[in-house]
Amino acid sequence: MKKMNKKEFKQCFSRRLAEKFAMEVSDASPSELYQTLGSLMTSAYSQDWRQTWQDYRDAEQKQSYYFSIEFLPGKMLKSNLLNMGWLETVEAGLLELGIQLDDLAEIEPDMALGNGGLGRLASCFMDSIASTGLPGNGNGIRYEYGLFKQRFVDNYQVELPDEWLQKGNLWEVRKESKAVNVRLGGNVYLSSDEMGNLTPHYQDGMVVRAVPYDTGMVGYQNNIVNTMRLWSVEIPAEEEGNYRSVEARRTVEDLTSVLYPDDSNEAGRRLRLSQEYFFVSAGVQSILRYYKELKQPIDKISQYVAIHINDTHPAMCVAEFMRLLIDEENVSWERAWNLTQKVMSYTNHTIMAEALEKWSIPMMKSVCPRIYQIIEEIDRRFVAEMTGVQSFDLIQRTRIIQNDQVHMAHLAIIGSHSTNGVAKLHSDLLKSVVLHDFYELYPARFNNKTNGIAMRRWTQLANPSMSKVLDETIGKTWRKTPGDLRLLLNYENDDQVLNNLAAAKLTNKKRLAAYIQENCGVEVNPHAIFDVQIKRLHAYKRQLLNLLHIIKLYLELKENPDLPIEPRVFIFGAKAAPSYHYAKSIIKVINETASLINNDDSIHNKLKIVFLENYNVSLAERIIPAADVSEQISLASKEASGTSNMKLMLNGAVTIATLDGANVEIRDAVGDDNIAIFGLTEEEVYQYYENKTYHAAAIYEQDNVVRRVIDTLIDGTIPNIHSEGQEIFDSLIKYNDEYFVLRDFEAYCIAQMSIDKAYKYQRRWLQISLRNIANAGRFSSDHTVQRYAEDIWQIEPVFAHKDDRGVTKH
Ligand code: GL5
């Protein structure tokens, strides 16, 4: 990629502004300046983008395609600048033109085509795949509306549409020439020729156009630009006549309109399944079209293509790939099946039953009838193959079609060569419990790939103050090789370094405090402990446990305002799914508790609660560098991995955690003395399930502290929560506390006391924090994707060895 000095950049920038808007810098709005900078950047990397694609093609590289219904890249301006190697030059050049880069970055809407960890992981992977020079692509949906914008009205969550495309999206390119047609609905019947070959005939239904929008995934200073391809629906020109009414057009346009249609009703579920088939079919068709251009025999396709099924949403890739091979390419079933299994791989991201998708047969038949036929045949052959080899019961439990439902995880496992979990514990649980039956059938297919995070975004971009201290202390190699963060361990007794890290943290805390003041009107003390829980709102993640502990502290302070605890600011960031009533009640109760505590002068500002609205990637970038404490308190066994735990440790926060998901590996990395572990283990949780011996009401009756705290939900201590307080109270006492909040409460309070105590000894605290930073390198997603590349996809990096003029040296 072309490197520029500051002077050249300023010239190019002013020239581009004049060309694009016929303006001088002094006349332009931040939005026009942002557009100008963006267009300068895209034209600078588009040469590399073409070249990367060309190189893969010339070298006939095997490529991977990561199919994900969510991508959560956040803002791309600064991360692209960083990866292009332009960040410092541009920042300085703009400053000389009187422009703050951060003001331009503010203009960009967060690209929020995802919910949480799953989508953010996909985006960290996209960054790392390009940065490690791997030939890998993303494939997903270009939703017109991203995840809703969250507002609090009367302390309730209210959802507003996220019209992120309103002002255009300068990173994407509409590739009309690469569009494909996707057929939805209708009927299909098969005719057979004298050789027994089956041909499908389609009746009715609709054909929609899938048009790709490609976004360049710029690798970290390596001249590689990969592609994230997101599909948008359009009405094909030849079908225009069939879609005259607004309503008819709407039925098509809805397909790629929203992320997660409300699945509490039939129409929403149907739309969701249609979305899944839409992006699966479009993606697989375009892969096959590309493969055919290579003019290789179809039987070699697994040497060129790896398709990754990210969670169950794209599981229909298995059946669609089969469909294309047998219906369009005339490949026999047996050969097609063999190729499909070699090409496909699958990651499971949760053990929560609700997320292991199942679709009713009538629904699937009506959305994608041919796919259903193929799944039925896969299921039939699976049963036939296993009969006589495995027990009847095992076959019944593992087959794809059961009780009138299609089990998507079963389809993904049976139709692929690899199934992985996302942290050691999670992968073990898949083998021993959740997918144990499949492990019996296919032990060699199971493996672990612990999640990772795009280190550059979460340090260099989000935390420049800490990054500077790291550069000054251990040099700059950690920027490219995160494992080098370990060099920091040499300085754990160096007061100067500890103080520098403390000063960087304080800078970040002050910045967050200013944001909190501006957005919530709450004044917080930057010297207080910033205790952070940021993640989707879900009962298993136990934001409620956090809240109950806060209430306990509050009650204690009310009794004894001089209680010798460190001042603490509890910071929450979380969205609740719009139809998840219970999670919304928790938000309401946290917010009302915040109003109560934040306005109670009698506790001398020792406690504050801040629930920041609209948690998203950009907000995470503000909060994480300022965190002292990282709350990872899900019920053991329920959080597959977690990734905010990794980001927070990397930024020097000390983790308070159950032994769940990747917390176990964080504990192993930092050692017991540098993390606060508490609560039931996963084995103990399973024992409770087995013995059915958990009685939350008994804890409530016997434990005075618990009772006092829980009663505040219903006795008027916390105002305005009449029904929500009762609902939560009932969930704990009447419905026996599904996530063992009360069982872990005491242990959690003790762990919290240890945090309070440790913080009092600042030097020791800073050492713990330093050890967390130093040991975070292993959680780089660069490392994770390399494991996927070697073990699952069998793809290799192409370092095209380009010179600075973008010329490929072979
Ligand atoms: C999730 C899990 O809940 C997280 O534990 C995990 O870190 C993440 C990425 O593997 O996947 N599954 C899921 O559906 N979402 C997640 O965050 O949204």
Image: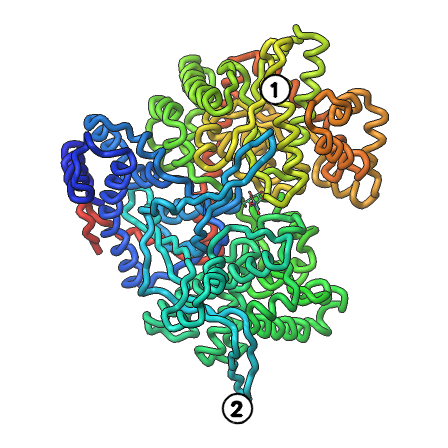
Decide which of 248, 705 is in the foreground and name it.
Answer: 248
Residue type beneath disc 2: Asp
User: Which residue is rendered at x = 65% and y = 74% of the image?
Assistant: 380
Decide which of 245, 172 is in the foreground and name it.
Answer: 245
Residue type beneath disc 1: Ile
Q: Which residue is outermost to the bottom? A: 194
User: Considering only order in the chain, which callout, 1 or 2, is on the residue closer to the N terminus?
Assistant: 2
Vertical comparison of 414 with 90: above or below: below
Can residue 279 be seen in the rendering of this structure? no
Give the number of the mark in front: 2 or 1: 2
Q: Which residue is outermost to the front? A: 245
Neighbours of disc 2 within 10 Å: few (<14), some (14-19), many (20+): few
Q: Position of residue 599 (x, y in %)?
A: 60, 15
Task: Specify the color scheme.
Answer: rainbow
User: Which residue is rendered at x = 60% and y = 33% of the image?
Assistant: 156
Can residue 413 be seen in the rendering of this structure? yes
Residue that label 1 marks: 755
Please give the count of numbered marks on the rendered protein: 2
Neighbours of disc 1 within 10 Å: few (<14), some (14-19), many (20+): many
**Res 271 → quadrant:** bottom right
Q: Position of residue 688 (x, y in %)?
A: 79, 40
- Which quadrant does the C terminus fall into? bottom left
Residue that label 2 marks: 193
Secondary structure type for disc 1: helix
**Res 577 → quadrant:** top right
Secondary structure type for disc 2: loop
Rounded to the nearest angstrom, the CA distance separating label 2 from label 1 is 74 Å
User: Which residue is rendered at x = 62% and y = 66% of the image?
Assistant: 363
Q: Position of residue 31 (x, y in %)?
A: 29, 37
Q: Is residue 463 left or right of residue 806?
A: right
